[in-house]
Amino acid sequence: MSTANTVELNLGVDNEAAPFYLPQHNEVELFTHAYENQLPVLIKGPTGCGKTRFISHMAERLGLPLHTVSCHDDLTASDLVGRYLIGDGMTQWHDGPLTRAVREGGICYLDEVVEARKDTTVVIHPLTDDRRILPIDRTNELLHAPKNFMLVVSYNPGYQNLMKGLKPSTRQRFISMSFNYLKPEEERRVLEAETGLDSANAQRLINLATGLRGLKDMDLEEGASTRLLVYAATLIKAGFDPVEACRAGLVESLTDDEDTITALMEVVKANF
Ligand SMILES: Nc1ncnc2c1ncn2[C@@H]1O[C@H](COP(=O)(O)OP(=O)(O)OP(=O)(O)O)[C@@H](O)[C@H]1O
């Protein structure tokens, strides 16, 4: 059954076109509810824990186009909304990705939103409350977001300083979900599904990740991400020596400090 406000979905059946995603908790149901009720979503979690994969999975599952913007500290409101550009001897308006998503519908995903300049929050605020509007001063337009428009933002709370956190007036406009690395058994399934690695080696990688994530005195900015484990698994699956695969796929990406690399490689050798 579908009404104006709901989408036809069978959450028990995976859409085969959707990229593989193993849920952490009830995020699929929460996200679907948010979409059906036109609520914006905020996802927080450490690097490489599956945030982007989840959004791609949900976009495919809900049959929505995905407009992704990787935010950075030079990103301004005009980059999101659009600007006049000179071409063919005249000035033409070009929609930015946010405006495109509002006009066409779909998910607008602002990845690492806290990196963007502060003026960007001014443009997303009216889209995140029940007005769901995007005023464009430069073109004198007032766009109303269609039902199938959804705003999703993500950030990694780990390495933000206080100044870069989201203001309460912004974060309190979203349904929020906190992601973390999967439990060991599930993360092993992801490694196997993503790379075809055998379960014995996948289990060794998981044991290694648990060891690395538990190191408190190593001064690592972040622990080993699922993404890095997938890289190492891919190298092992391709026939690389597991220790060398872990050096290139994991350890060298975690730190530049030679002493730390040596110490981490000891942990690798203890597992392989
Ligand atoms: N729950 C999961 N199901 C399937 N694959 C996963 C899952 N979690 C992580 N992965 C794997 O880990 C990789 C990295 O995940 P992803 O790119 O979604 O991380 P992220 O949280 O968006 O990271 P960043 O914050 O750095 O952008 C994926 O490409 C996928 O291979």
Image (cartoon, helix red, strand yellow):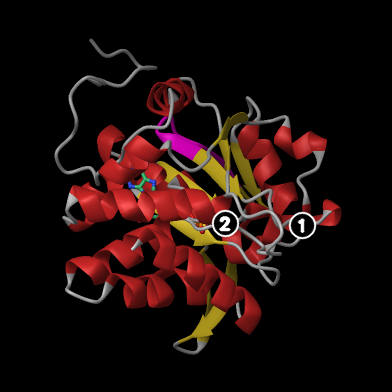
Picture disc at residue 119: 1
Tell me the SS state at disc 2.
Answer: loop
Q: In the rendered structure, which amino acid carries the disc numbered 1?
A: Asp
Residue occupied by mark 2: 223
- Say what amino acid the circle numbered 2 marks: Gly
The foreground one among 121 and 42 is 42
In magenta, the rendered stretch is 142-150
Q: Position of residue 131 (x, y in %)?
A: 63, 28
| 265 over 156 or under it: above or below | below
Mark 1 secondary-structure assignment = helix
Q: Please name whichever residue, 125 or 173, is drawn nearer the observer in this view of the structure.
A: 173
Q: Are marks 1 and 2 in contact (CB under 8 Å)?
A: no
- CA distance separating discs 1 and 2: 32 Å
Viewport quadrant of the N terminus: top left
Judged from this view, the residue extending furthest toward the right is 163
Task: Give the quadrant of residue 64.
Answer: top left
Q: Is mark 1 within 8 Å of ligand 1?
A: no
Residue 50 inside the magenta-drawn segment = no
Is 259 rendered above or below residue 143?
below
